[in-house]
Amino acid sequence: MTSEATGGESGRDSASEAGRYATGYHAPVLCKAVVDGLITDRSGIYVDGTLGGGGHAAALLDALNENGRVIGIDRDEAARAEVQRRLAPQIRTGRLILLGGDFRDLESHLDGVGAVSVDGILLDLGVSSRQLDDATRGFSYSRTGALDMRMGSSGKTAADIVNDAPEAELAAILREYGEERRARRIAKTIVAARPVNTTAQLADAVRSCVPIAEEIKSLSRIFQALRIVVNDELAALESALESATRIVRSGGRLAVISYHSLEDRRVKRYLRFGNFAGQPVKDVYGNVQTPWSPIAPRLIRPDAEEIEFNPRSRSARLRIAERTDFSDRESPT
Ligand SMILES: C[S@@+](CC[C@H](N)C(=O)[O-])C[C@H]1O[C@@H](n2cnc3c(N)ncnc32)[C@H](O)[C@@H]1O
Protein backbone atom coordinates (compact mmCIF):
# COMPACT_ATOMS: atom_id res chain seq x y z
CA MET A 1 0.00 0.00 0.00
CA THR A 2 1.37 3.41 -0.95
CA SER A 3 1.74 5.74 1.98
CA GLU A 4 0.10 8.89 0.75
CA ALA A 5 -0.39 12.14 2.64
CA THR A 6 -3.40 14.22 1.72
CA GLY A 7 -3.22 17.67 0.23
CA GLY A 8 -3.22 19.26 -3.18
CA GLU A 9 -6.31 20.47 -4.99
CA SER A 10 -9.19 19.77 -2.69
CA GLY A 11 -11.91 17.45 -3.88
CA ARG A 12 -10.48 16.53 -7.26
CA ASP A 13 -10.13 12.83 -7.99
CA SER A 14 -8.23 12.29 -11.22
CA ALA A 15 -8.25 8.81 -12.72
CA SER A 16 -4.91 7.96 -11.14
CA GLU A 17 -6.10 9.20 -7.74
CA ALA A 18 -9.30 7.18 -8.20
CA GLY A 19 -7.30 4.08 -9.03
CA ARG A 20 -4.78 4.37 -6.21
CA TYR A 21 -6.86 2.43 -3.67
CA ALA A 22 -8.90 0.34 -6.14
CA THR A 23 -8.75 -3.45 -5.98
CA GLY A 24 -10.57 -6.18 -7.89
CA TYR A 25 -13.09 -6.11 -5.04
CA HIS A 26 -14.11 -2.45 -5.30
CA ALA A 27 -12.84 0.95 -6.41
CA PRO A 28 -13.49 3.57 -3.71
CA VAL A 29 -15.38 6.53 -5.12
CA LEU A 30 -14.25 10.15 -4.68
CA CYS A 31 -11.50 8.83 -2.44
CA LYS A 32 -9.30 11.94 -2.33
CA ALA A 33 -12.27 14.26 -1.74
CA VAL A 34 -13.41 12.05 1.15
CA VAL A 35 -9.98 12.00 2.79
CA ASP A 36 -9.37 15.72 2.28
CA GLY A 37 -12.83 16.66 3.49
CA LEU A 38 -13.20 14.30 6.43
CA ILE A 39 -9.88 14.52 8.25
CA THR A 40 -9.48 17.54 10.53
CA ASP A 41 -7.07 15.93 13.01
CA ARG A 42 -4.48 13.44 11.82
CA SER A 43 -4.37 11.83 15.30
CA GLY A 44 -8.14 11.49 15.42
CA ILE A 45 -10.62 8.62 15.51
CA TYR A 46 -12.67 8.09 12.35
CA VAL A 47 -15.50 5.68 11.62
CA ASP A 48 -15.92 4.02 8.23
CA GLY A 49 -19.48 2.69 8.56
CA THR A 50 -19.38 0.97 5.15
CA LEU A 51 -16.01 -0.76 4.87
CA GLY A 52 -16.71 -2.73 1.69
CA GLY A 53 -13.33 -3.68 0.23
CA GLY A 54 -11.54 -1.28 2.59
CA GLY A 55 -10.43 1.25 -0.06
CA HIS A 56 -11.57 4.36 1.78
CA ALA A 57 -10.37 2.90 5.09
CA ALA A 58 -6.91 2.27 3.60
CA ALA A 59 -6.75 5.84 2.28
CA LEU A 60 -7.85 7.28 5.63
CA LEU A 61 -5.25 5.20 7.48
CA ASP A 62 -2.52 6.39 5.10
CA ALA A 63 -3.50 10.01 5.70
CA LEU A 64 -3.64 9.71 9.51
CA ASN A 65 -0.51 9.65 11.66
CA GLU A 66 0.51 6.72 13.85
CA ASN A 67 -1.93 7.77 16.58
CA GLY A 68 -4.90 8.03 14.23
CA ARG A 69 -7.46 5.22 14.29
CA VAL A 70 -10.23 3.94 12.04
CA ILE A 71 -13.18 1.97 13.37
CA GLY A 72 -14.57 0.05 10.40
CA ILE A 73 -18.02 -1.55 10.20
CA ASP A 74 -19.73 -3.69 7.59
CA ARG A 75 -22.75 -5.95 7.81
CA ASP A 76 -21.39 -8.20 5.07
CA GLU A 77 -19.19 -11.04 6.28
CA ALA A 78 -17.42 -11.33 2.90
CA ALA A 79 -16.48 -7.62 3.04
CA ARG A 80 -15.02 -8.06 6.51
CA ALA A 81 -13.02 -11.08 5.37
CA GLU A 82 -11.61 -8.99 2.49
CA VAL A 83 -10.60 -6.16 4.84
CA GLN A 84 -9.16 -8.63 7.32
CA ARG A 85 -6.88 -9.86 4.55
CA ARG A 86 -6.09 -6.51 2.91
CA LEU A 87 -5.48 -4.47 6.04
CA ALA A 88 -4.11 -7.21 8.33
CA PRO A 89 -1.08 -5.13 9.51
CA GLN A 90 -3.28 -2.17 10.47
CA ILE A 91 -5.65 -4.49 12.35
CA ARG A 92 -2.72 -6.10 14.14
CA THR A 93 -1.35 -2.76 15.34
CA GLY A 94 -4.81 -1.61 16.45
CA ARG A 95 -4.97 1.27 13.95
CA LEU A 96 -8.02 -0.37 12.36
CA ILE A 97 -10.73 -1.85 14.55
CA LEU A 98 -12.92 -4.14 12.47
CA LEU A 99 -16.55 -4.63 13.55
CA GLY A 100 -19.42 -6.62 12.11
CA GLY A 101 -22.95 -5.26 12.11
CA ASP A 102 -25.30 -2.58 10.89
CA PHE A 103 -24.34 1.09 10.89
CA ARG A 104 -27.83 1.86 12.19
CA ASP A 105 -26.46 0.72 15.59
CA LEU A 106 -23.48 3.08 15.41
CA GLU A 107 -23.65 4.13 19.05
CA SER A 108 -23.70 0.61 20.47
CA HIS A 109 -20.83 -0.41 18.17
CA LEU A 110 -18.76 2.52 19.41
CA ASP A 111 -19.75 1.92 23.05
CA GLY A 112 -18.46 -1.62 22.63
CA VAL A 113 -14.96 -0.34 21.80
CA GLY A 114 -15.01 2.49 24.34
CA ALA A 115 -15.29 5.37 21.84
CA VAL A 116 -17.61 8.05 23.21
CA SER A 117 -16.94 10.68 20.62
CA VAL A 118 -15.21 10.61 17.22
CA ASP A 119 -13.63 13.09 14.80
CA GLY A 120 -15.42 11.95 11.67
CA ILE A 121 -17.73 9.41 10.10
CA LEU A 122 -17.88 8.16 6.51
CA LEU A 123 -20.92 6.44 5.00
CA ASP A 124 -20.45 5.23 1.42
CA LEU A 125 -23.94 3.88 0.85
CA GLY A 126 -25.26 1.03 -1.25
CA VAL A 127 -23.46 -2.06 -2.45
CA SER A 128 -19.86 -2.75 -3.43
CA SER A 129 -18.80 -3.87 -6.90
CA ARG A 130 -18.09 -7.34 -5.51
CA GLN A 131 -21.60 -7.64 -4.09
CA LEU A 132 -23.01 -6.61 -7.49
CA ASP A 133 -20.73 -8.89 -9.48
CA ASP A 134 -21.28 -11.99 -7.36
CA ALA A 135 -24.28 -13.68 -9.00
CA THR A 136 -25.03 -15.66 -5.84
CA ARG A 137 -25.90 -12.46 -3.96
CA GLY A 138 -28.77 -11.65 -6.34
CA PHE A 139 -28.18 -7.87 -6.59
CA SER A 140 -27.72 -7.66 -10.35
CA TYR A 141 -30.32 -8.03 -13.10
CA SER A 142 -27.57 -8.91 -15.55
CA ARG A 143 -26.32 -11.96 -13.61
CA THR A 144 -28.44 -15.02 -13.00
CA GLY A 145 -28.63 -16.10 -9.38
CA ALA A 146 -30.99 -16.65 -6.49
CA LEU A 147 -33.07 -13.55 -5.78
CA ASP A 148 -31.49 -12.83 -2.40
CA MET A 149 -30.17 -9.22 -2.10
CA ARG A 150 -29.40 -9.40 1.62
CA MET A 151 -26.21 -7.60 2.61
CA GLY A 152 -26.17 -9.55 5.87
CA SER A 153 -27.28 -13.13 6.39
CA SER A 154 -30.62 -12.74 8.16
CA GLY A 155 -34.08 -11.41 7.31
CA LYS A 156 -36.34 -11.68 4.27
CA THR A 157 -34.85 -12.13 0.82
CA ALA A 158 -36.04 -10.32 -2.29
CA ALA A 159 -37.65 -13.61 -3.40
CA ASP A 160 -39.69 -13.68 -0.16
CA ILE A 161 -40.99 -10.20 -0.98
CA VAL A 162 -41.83 -10.72 -4.65
CA ASN A 163 -43.52 -14.06 -3.91
CA ASP A 164 -45.38 -13.20 -0.70
CA ALA A 165 -46.34 -9.52 -0.80
CA PRO A 166 -49.88 -8.74 -1.96
CA GLU A 167 -49.91 -7.15 -5.42
CA ALA A 168 -50.87 -3.68 -4.10
CA GLU A 169 -48.05 -3.77 -1.55
CA LEU A 170 -45.56 -4.84 -4.20
CA ALA A 171 -46.69 -1.98 -6.45
CA ALA A 172 -46.30 0.48 -3.56
CA ILE A 173 -42.73 -0.78 -2.93
CA LEU A 174 -41.78 -0.39 -6.60
CA ARG A 175 -43.31 3.10 -6.74
CA GLU A 176 -41.94 4.41 -3.47
CA TYR A 177 -38.44 2.92 -3.47
CA GLY A 178 -37.84 2.61 -7.21
CA GLU A 179 -39.74 5.75 -8.25
CA GLU A 180 -41.12 3.54 -11.04
CA ARG A 181 -44.19 4.98 -12.72
CA ARG A 182 -45.24 1.65 -14.25
CA ALA A 183 -45.23 0.10 -10.76
CA ARG A 184 -48.80 -1.26 -10.92
CA ARG A 185 -48.35 -2.94 -14.27
CA ILE A 186 -44.98 -4.43 -13.29
CA ALA A 187 -46.34 -5.69 -9.93
CA LYS A 188 -49.26 -7.36 -11.73
CA THR A 189 -46.87 -9.07 -14.17
CA ILE A 190 -44.61 -10.26 -11.35
CA VAL A 191 -47.58 -11.71 -9.43
CA ALA A 192 -48.72 -13.56 -12.58
CA ALA A 193 -45.19 -14.95 -13.04
CA ARG A 194 -44.91 -16.39 -9.48
CA PRO A 195 -42.94 -18.20 -8.25
CA VAL A 196 -40.10 -15.77 -9.05
CA ASN A 197 -36.97 -17.15 -7.43
CA THR A 198 -34.08 -15.94 -9.58
CA THR A 199 -32.79 -12.59 -10.82
CA ALA A 200 -33.37 -13.79 -14.40
CA GLN A 201 -37.04 -14.64 -13.73
CA LEU A 202 -37.61 -11.22 -12.20
CA ALA A 203 -35.78 -9.47 -15.04
CA ASP A 204 -37.83 -11.40 -17.64
CA ALA A 205 -41.08 -10.41 -15.93
CA VAL A 206 -40.06 -6.74 -15.93
CA ARG A 207 -38.86 -6.85 -19.56
CA SER A 208 -42.15 -8.39 -20.67
CA CYS A 209 -44.16 -5.34 -19.65
CA VAL A 210 -42.00 -2.25 -20.32
CA PRO A 211 -40.99 -0.69 -23.65
CA ILE A 212 -37.56 -1.84 -24.89
CA ALA A 213 -36.19 1.68 -24.63
CA GLU A 214 -37.10 1.76 -20.92
CA GLU A 215 -35.88 -1.73 -20.02
CA ILE A 216 -32.56 -0.85 -18.42
CA LYS A 217 -33.98 2.03 -16.39
CA SER A 218 -36.94 -0.02 -15.19
CA LEU A 219 -34.74 -2.98 -14.28
CA SER A 220 -32.44 -0.68 -12.28
CA ARG A 221 -35.38 0.88 -10.49
CA ILE A 222 -37.06 -2.44 -9.64
CA PHE A 223 -33.84 -4.01 -8.36
CA GLN A 224 -33.07 -0.84 -6.40
CA ALA A 225 -36.53 -0.83 -4.80
CA LEU A 226 -36.27 -4.43 -3.64
CA ARG A 227 -32.71 -3.98 -2.34
CA ILE A 228 -33.77 -0.95 -0.30
CA VAL A 229 -36.65 -2.87 1.28
CA VAL A 230 -34.71 -6.10 1.88
CA ASN A 231 -31.97 -4.19 3.73
CA ASP A 232 -34.22 -1.49 5.23
CA GLU A 233 -31.67 0.96 3.84
CA LEU A 234 -33.44 4.27 4.32
CA ALA A 235 -34.32 3.67 7.98
CA ALA A 236 -30.71 2.56 8.61
CA LEU A 237 -29.44 5.74 6.97
CA GLU A 238 -31.72 8.00 9.03
CA SER A 239 -30.74 6.26 12.23
CA ALA A 240 -27.00 6.57 11.41
CA LEU A 241 -27.30 10.28 10.58
CA GLU A 242 -29.02 10.96 13.92
CA SER A 243 -26.40 8.90 15.75
CA ALA A 244 -23.65 10.87 13.99
CA THR A 245 -25.06 14.06 15.52
CA ARG A 246 -24.65 12.58 18.99
CA ILE A 247 -21.24 11.02 18.34
CA VAL A 248 -19.17 13.44 16.25
CA ARG A 249 -17.37 16.10 18.30
CA SER A 250 -17.95 19.77 17.59
CA GLY A 251 -15.72 20.66 14.62
CA GLY A 252 -15.64 17.03 13.47
CA ARG A 253 -17.12 15.94 10.15
CA LEU A 254 -19.58 13.62 8.46
CA ALA A 255 -19.13 12.55 4.83
CA VAL A 256 -21.88 10.68 3.00
CA ILE A 257 -21.76 9.30 -0.54
CA SER A 258 -25.21 8.49 -1.94
CA TYR A 259 -26.10 6.84 -5.21
CA HIS A 260 -29.75 7.74 -5.74
CA SER A 261 -32.10 10.57 -4.96
CA LEU A 262 -33.98 8.85 -2.10
CA GLU A 263 -30.73 8.70 -0.15
CA ASP A 264 -29.35 12.04 -1.26
CA ARG A 265 -32.56 13.93 -0.41
CA ARG A 266 -32.42 12.65 3.17
CA VAL A 267 -28.71 13.43 3.51
CA LYS A 268 -29.08 16.92 2.02
CA ARG A 269 -31.95 17.87 4.32
CA TYR A 270 -30.38 16.42 7.41
CA LEU A 271 -27.03 18.14 6.87
CA ARG A 272 -28.74 21.44 6.17
CA PHE A 273 -31.50 21.47 8.80
CA GLY A 274 -30.72 18.67 11.27
CA ASN A 275 -34.03 16.96 10.46
CA PHE A 276 -35.59 14.97 7.61
CA ALA A 277 -38.57 17.25 7.17
CA GLY A 278 -36.28 20.00 5.83
CA GLN A 279 -37.66 22.44 8.42
CA PRO A 280 -35.38 25.18 9.76
CA VAL A 281 -35.32 25.24 13.58
CA LYS A 282 -34.89 28.79 14.96
CA ASP A 283 -33.99 30.13 18.38
CA VAL A 284 -35.96 32.92 20.07
CA TYR A 285 -33.97 35.51 18.07
CA GLY A 286 -34.82 33.86 14.76
CA ASN A 287 -31.33 32.39 14.22
CA VAL A 288 -31.35 29.01 12.49
CA GLN A 289 -30.06 26.31 14.86
CA THR A 290 -28.56 23.30 13.19
CA PRO A 291 -26.14 20.61 14.33
CA TRP A 292 -24.37 20.45 10.94
CA SER A 293 -22.86 23.06 8.68
CA PRO A 294 -22.32 21.83 5.10
CA ILE A 295 -18.82 22.56 3.84
CA ALA A 296 -18.18 23.93 0.36
CA PRO A 297 -18.63 22.71 -2.27
CA ARG A 298 -21.95 21.41 -0.96
CA LEU A 299 -22.11 18.68 -3.59
CA ILE A 300 -19.09 16.80 -4.95
CA ARG A 301 -19.46 14.56 -8.01
CA PRO A 302 -16.88 12.39 -9.76
CA ASP A 303 -15.16 14.07 -12.70
CA ALA A 304 -15.09 12.65 -16.23
CA GLU A 305 -11.75 10.91 -15.64
CA GLU A 306 -13.02 9.08 -12.57
CA ILE A 307 -16.22 8.04 -14.37
CA GLU A 308 -14.17 6.73 -17.26
CA PHE A 309 -11.95 4.77 -14.86
CA ASN A 310 -14.92 3.56 -12.80
CA PRO A 311 -18.29 3.90 -14.60
CA ARG A 312 -20.12 2.78 -11.44
CA SER A 313 -19.08 6.05 -9.80
CA ARG A 314 -21.23 8.09 -12.18
CA SER A 315 -24.24 8.46 -9.88
CA ALA A 316 -22.20 9.23 -6.75
CA ARG A 317 -22.95 12.39 -4.79
CA LEU A 318 -20.72 13.29 -1.86
CA ARG A 319 -21.82 15.73 0.85
CA ILE A 320 -19.62 16.70 3.78
CA ALA A 321 -20.66 18.73 6.81
CA GLU A 322 -19.02 19.93 10.00
CA ARG A 323 -20.55 19.40 13.42
CA THR A 324 -21.48 22.79 14.88
CA ASP A 325 -21.54 23.41 18.63
CA PHE A 326 -25.35 23.41 18.62
CA SER A 327 -26.05 21.04 21.49
CA ASP A 328 -29.77 20.43 21.36
CA ARG A 329 -29.44 16.84 20.22
CA GLU A 330 -33.17 16.21 20.28
CA SER A 331 -33.85 18.00 16.98
CA PRO A 332 -37.20 17.17 15.32
CA THR A 333 -37.28 14.52 12.57
C1 LIG B 1 -20.32 1.08 -1.60
S1 LIG B 1 -19.74 -0.18 -0.56
C2 LIG B 1 -18.44 0.61 0.32
C3 LIG B 1 -17.13 0.53 -0.37
C4 LIG B 1 -15.97 1.05 0.45
N1 LIG B 1 -16.10 2.45 0.75
C5 LIG B 1 -14.64 0.77 -0.21
O1 LIG B 1 -13.82 1.69 -0.33
O2 LIG B 1 -14.41 -0.38 -0.62
C6 LIG B 1 -20.96 -0.25 0.68
C7 LIG B 1 -20.69 -1.26 1.77
O3 LIG B 1 -21.51 -0.90 2.87
C8 LIG B 1 -22.09 -2.04 3.43
N2 LIG B 1 -23.36 -1.61 4.03
C9 LIG B 1 -24.43 -1.11 3.41
N3 LIG B 1 -25.39 -0.82 4.29
C10 LIG B 1 -24.88 -1.11 5.52
C11 LIG B 1 -25.39 -1.00 6.85
N4 LIG B 1 -26.61 -0.55 7.10
N5 LIG B 1 -24.59 -1.35 7.87
C12 LIG B 1 -23.32 -1.82 7.62
N6 LIG B 1 -22.80 -1.96 6.39
C13 LIG B 1 -23.58 -1.62 5.36
C14 LIG B 1 -22.26 -3.01 2.28
O4 LIG B 1 -22.27 -4.34 2.75
C15 LIG B 1 -21.04 -2.69 1.42
O5 LIG B 1 -19.96 -3.54 1.73
Image (cartoon, rainbow, N blue to C red):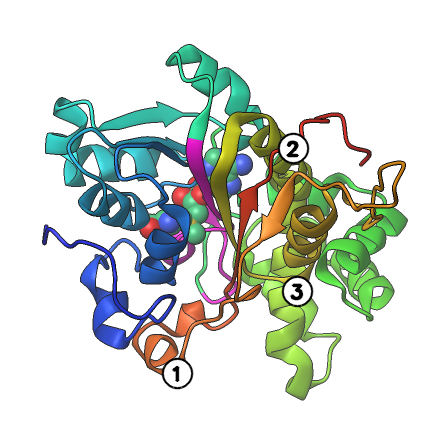
Q: Residue at x 79, y 42 (%)?
A: 165
Image height of 22 relative to 81, above or below: below
Specify whether tag 1 is near ligand 1 (CB below 8 Å): no
Among the two numbered marks 2 and 3 on one chain, the one whose residue lies closer to the N terminus: 3
Which quarter of the figure is the C terminus placed in? top right
Q: Is residue 195 magenta?
A: no
- Circle 2 or circle 1, nearest the eye: 2
Left or right of 185 on screen, residue 252: left
> Which disc number belongs to residue 242?
2
Q: How many angstroms separate mark 2 from mark 1 (CA)?
A: 33 Å
Q: Percent position (x, y) of residue 190?
A: 74, 58
Q: Percent position (x, y) of residue 139?
A: 50, 53
Q: Please name the amino acid that badge 1 sits on.
A: Ala
Image height of 169 relative to 140, above or below: above
Outermost residue toward the bottom in this view: 213
Q: Which residue is mark 1?
A: 304
Classed neighbour count for the residue bearing mark 3: other residues with Cα under 10 Å, few (<14), some (14–19), many (≥20): many
Q: Please name the amino acid that badge 3 sits on.
A: Arg
Give the extent of the magenta segment: 119-142
Q: Percent position (x, y) of residue 197?
A: 59, 48
- Circle 3 or circle 1, nearest the eye: 1
Q: Residue at x 39, y 74 (%)?
A: 311
Q: How many angstroms separate mark 2 from mark 3 (CA)?
A: 27 Å
Q: Secondary structure at mark 1?
A: helix
Q: Is residue 129 magenta?
A: yes
